[in-house]
Image: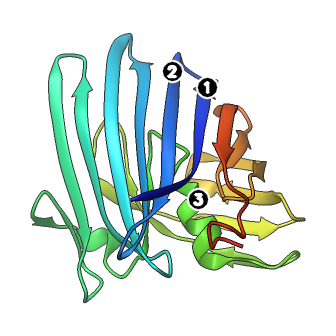
Amino acid sequence: MQPHSSILWRRLDLEGHDACLLGATDQGWRLEGHALFAHDGQPCSLAYAVDCDAGWSTRSARIDGFAGTQELHYEAERLADGQWMLNGVGQAEVAGLVDVDLGFTPATNLVAVRRFDLGVGMATAAPAAYLAFPELRLTRLDQTYRRLDENRYAYAAPAFGYEAILTVSSAGFVLDYPGLWQSAAWAGCPAEDAGLA
């Protein structure tokens, strides 16, 4: 993988951090990261990797780690016919969806931002296969994005009653996720050099 951009977030609603690396692969793009946080007073450590094709359609996601004293290993795969599998079990509720959204990290918002590539003033529905935490099951999450200017999107996830203005880096990472995450450091080449512009 050829790395292009990385970021460190601080979690605002709980004790925690998340660091993520974006890079190019022979097949497209990969996000690799590690989220460390407290949940219900227990330590959680989740390493994740999301692989996308050249057009930012999700191909697979893998999560390994632990919550409290329970080890966790999950692999989600989107098949060529649009079906999703989670640890080898079909996930009918999310059939036909293209994006994955890992519920414990802001990293996967980048996938939707890059795939839709909205012009200023444009909006789109962006339903995703949402990996809920701590349940770790795939459900449909309806979301919308509306691009306000070069670096800001109006985002809504009605199921959570959440609406906010997200500030996004040139690479597509969310820098400011009001009430949930705040970037603490980020690095990388300009979007045009990474083929992201």
Q: Quadrant of residue 187?
A: top right
Please give the residue where the numbered disc 1 appears in the rendered image.
10
Circle 2 SS class: strand
Circle 3 SS class: helix
Q: Are marks 2 and 1 in contact (CB under 8 Å)?
A: yes
Q: Residue furthest top?
A: 41
Question: The disc labelled 1 sits on which kind of residue?
Answer: Arg
For the residue pair 130 and 9, the one nearer the viewer reads as 9
Q: CA distance from mark 2 to mark 1?
A: 6 Å
Q: As drawn, is 11 to the left or to the right of 193?
A: left
Q: CA distance from mark 2 to mark 3?
A: 20 Å
For the residue pair 55 and 101, the one nearer the viewer reads as 55
Q: Residue furthest left?
A: 88
Sequence-first disc among 2 and 3: 2
Sequence-first disc among 1 and 3: 1
Please give the residue where the numbered disc 2 appears in the rendered image.
16
